[in-house]
Image (cartoon, rainbow, N blue to C red):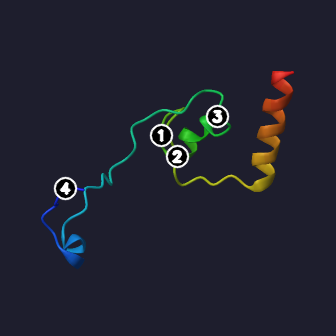
Amino acid sequence: MPDVGAKGAGVLRFKLNVKWTKDRGKDTSDAPWYHLGPEYGGKEGDRVNDHHLSLEEKRRARAEKETERC
């Protein structure tokens, strides 16, 4: 491994290279949350990181996708 210039706990003192702005990507139209963009002030297909599916919603989406394959 090459030397990164920080020894010991020094790596904790440097600013992280994390992009904290909005994710500009789009979800695929077959994603169960594809239609949620307008509910969160965006467009249809926008990635919404604040929406969390319940276990029942996840199971229902898996079952629907499984029936579509058959």
Residue lying farthest front?
1
| Relative to 39, 23 lies left or right | left
Separation of residues labelled 3 and 1 (CA atoms) = 16 Å
Label ID, residue 42: 1
Q: What residue lies at 77% left-to-right and 55% top-to-bottom? A: 55
Left or right: residue 22 compared with residue 63: left
Query: What residue would you read off at disc 3?
Result: 31
Residue under label 4, please give it: 2
Task: Report the amino acid beneath label 2.
Answer: Val
Q: Quote the CA–CA distance across marks 1 and 2.
A: 9 Å
Say which of 26 and 2 sits in front.
Answer: 2
Residue closer to the observer: 40 or 20: 20
Q: Position of residue 68 (x, y in %)?
A: 82, 24
Residue contact between numbered discs 4 and 1, judged by CB atoms under 8 Å = no
Q: Earlier in the sequence, mark 1 or mark 2?
A: 1
Mark 2 / mark 3, whichever is N-terminal = 3
Tell me the crowding category of disc 3: few under 14, some 14 to 19, or many 20 or more residues within 10 angstroms, Cα based. few
Name the residue beneath numbered marker 2. Answer: 48
Tag 3: amino acid: Ala
Q: Secondary structure at mark 1?
A: loop
Going from the N terminus, do you reach mark 3 or mark 1 first?
A: 3
Answer with the quarter of the image where residue 12 lies: bottom left
SS type, badge 3: loop
Q: Residue at x 43, y 35 (%)?
A: 25
Residue 3 placement: quadrant? bottom left
